[in-house]
Image (cartoon, rainbow, N blue to C red):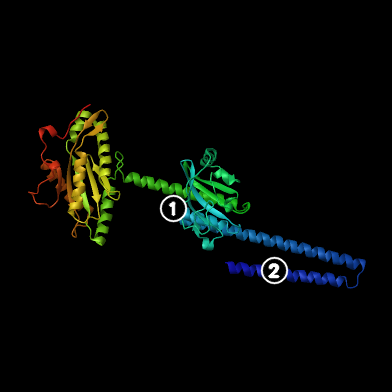
């Protein structure tokens, strides 16, 4: 495309040169035997020459403007197509700043950045220098051209008034970088910034900040407005999809993963286990005496108890482990990358110990010890449902023995943990007090 443009510009200059040369020769011929009539003819020819040159210049300018406009439309069209297939917000931002950098490519020193706003401060997400080699992506707001790819800019303060205007959807031109609250910016950042808020519906997804060494061309601003509308809608759509997906995979009461998420996570863990050779541990637990809590204190107290149990379970596992709720008072913990069954049993013992302690529920203190069944994956087990079934069978056997934890497939005479011994009358599953 660049070669065709260069050839077109060269041919246009050649045509202008030929036309101009012809008129100059005609004017010179008229002055070879100067008379008043010849002088008038020469002046007319020169005036015609100027008029032709101006017409050609205007036509060439119009053609260049049309080509630039078509190029900008192409950029927006390609961006729209790419955004349709993008579900990652980071990728949406990357595509946005790359497109903005292309729109600003003819502006000296142009930069484009998407900033996020949190806790009254701008946080750099990702940006691009339009004049950087191959549109290299860098973080902006006064960052060097050789900054590492995708470096996050530290949060910088911003005035409440500025943030409120941006959240309201107003395009703001900041001519003094101090208004951004960016202390100690590089001299290159001493330039006007055009801040275009990314608002889609009632969602605010950040700010597209663009700048150049001088004022941005008026013809580029409509394209930037169209770009920010595309990106705002894309980010809002991605966020909404993520929220709906998360709601579909989470238990609304405890915030833990539901049965669908557990099956998905167990399936992923089993696939990784095949590659690493390390087993996956699934722990299925049931609260002893939970039905009595609902019967004696009502379902509101029971719900608060389940929420407290969920918090304790989160504290018993690693960050990479998954905690979920099957329903009722049944919970599941998925732990992977184990070296032996002892690792899973250690987690089970930790859970039994944590849930054996009383749990405050309003003015009451309740106690519902857990029965935990543990199952480990093996070469012949490929289904998440099968792993859950084995853990469930071990859990029911542990409950039959009085509580505690039990590994599926362990000898029937295997002793349980002290917490799993049959409960004495003084340590019944339910106790309450004020």
Image point 86% across, 66% down: which residue? Answer: 41
Residue underneath mark 1: 90
Q: Is residue 338 visible?
A: yes
Tell me where residue 27 appears, x and y as whole percent. 84, 69
Which label sits on residue 259? none
Q: Is residue 133 above or below residue 282?
A: below
Local packing at callout 1 (Cα closer than 10 Å; few below 14, some 14-19, many 20+) is: few
Tell me where residue 280 appears, x and y as whole percent. 22, 54
Q: Point out the residue furthest to the top here.
A: 434
Camera-side residue of 283 and 85: 283
Q: Quadrant of residue 247?
A: top left
Q: Quadrant of residue 103?
A: bottom right
Q: Is residue 113 above or below residue 19?
A: above
Q: Point out the residue furthest to the right here.
A: 35
Q: Point out the residue furthest to the front here.
A: 184
Quarter that holds the C terminus: top left
Cα separation between marks 1 and 2: 46 Å
Query: How many marks overall?
Result: 2
Q: Secondary structure at mark 1?
A: helix
Local packing at callout 2 (Cα closer than 10 Å; few below 14, some 14-19, many 20+) is: some
Which label sits on residue 13? 2
Tell me where residue 171 appears, x and y as whole percent. 56, 44
Q: Is residue 347 left or right of residue 249?
A: left
Q: Is residue 389 visible?
A: no
Q: Is residue 321 above or below residue 108?
A: above
Q: Is residue 373 above or below residue 18?
A: above
Camera-side residue of 121 and 72: 121
Q: Is residue 103 left or right of residue 27?
A: left
Quarter that holds the N terminus: bottom right
Image point 55% across, 44% down: which residue? Answer: 180
């Amino acid at each position: 495309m660049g070669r065709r443009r260069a050839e077109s510009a060269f041919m246009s200059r050649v045509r202008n040169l030929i036309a101009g040369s012809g008129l100059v020769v005609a004017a010179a011929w008229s002055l070879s035997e100067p008379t008043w009539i010849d002088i008038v003819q020469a002046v007319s020819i020169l005036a015609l020459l100027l008029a032709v040159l101006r017409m050609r210049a205007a036509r060439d300018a119009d053609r260049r403007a049309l080509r630039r406009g078509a190029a900008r439309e192409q950029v927006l069209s390609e961006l729209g197509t790419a955004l349709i297939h993008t579900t990652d917000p980071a990728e949406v931002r990357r595509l946005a700043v790359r497109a903005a950098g292309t729109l600003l490519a003819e502006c000296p020193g142009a930069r484009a950045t998407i900033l996020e706003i949190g806790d009254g401060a701008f946080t750099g997400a990702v940006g691009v220098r339009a004049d950087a080699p191959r549109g290299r992506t860098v973080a902006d707001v006064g960052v060097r051209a050789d900054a590492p790819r995708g470096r996050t800019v530290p949060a910088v303060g911003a005035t409440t008034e500025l943030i409120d205007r941006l959240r309201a959807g107003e395009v703001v031109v900041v001519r003094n970088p101090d208004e951004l609250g960016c202390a100690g910016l590089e001299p290159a950042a001493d330039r006007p910034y055009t801040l275009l808020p990314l608002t889609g519906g009632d969602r605010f997804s950040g700010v597209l900040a663009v700048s150049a060494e001088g004022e941005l061309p008026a013809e580029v601003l409509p394209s930037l407005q169209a770009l920010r509308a595309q990106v705002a809608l894309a980010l809002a759509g991605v966020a909404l999809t993520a929220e709906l997906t998360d709601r579909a995979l989470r238990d609304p009461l405890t915030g833990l993963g539901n049965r669908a998420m557990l099956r998905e996570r167990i399936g992923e863990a089993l696939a990784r286990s095949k590659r690493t050779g390390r087993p996956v541990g699934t722990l299925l637990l049931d609260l002893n005496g939970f039905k009595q809590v609902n019967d004696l204190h009502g379902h509101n107290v029971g719900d608060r108890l389940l929420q407290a149990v969920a918090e304790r379970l989160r504290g018993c596992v690693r960050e990479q482990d998954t905690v979920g709720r099957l329903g009722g008072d049944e919970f599941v913990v998925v732990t992977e990358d184990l070296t032996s069954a002892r690792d899973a049993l250690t987690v089970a013992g930790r859970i039994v110990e944590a849930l054996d302690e009383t749990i405050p529920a309003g003015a009451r203190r309740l106690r519902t010890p857990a029965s935990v069944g543990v199952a480990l994956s093996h070469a012949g087990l490929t289904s998440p449902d099968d792993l859950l079934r084995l853990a469930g069978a071990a859990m029911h056997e542990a409950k039959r023995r009085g509580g505690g934890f039990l590994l599926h497939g362990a000898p029937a005479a295997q002793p349980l943990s002290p917490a799993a011994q049959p409960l004495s009358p003084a340590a019944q599953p339910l106790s309450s007090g004020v």
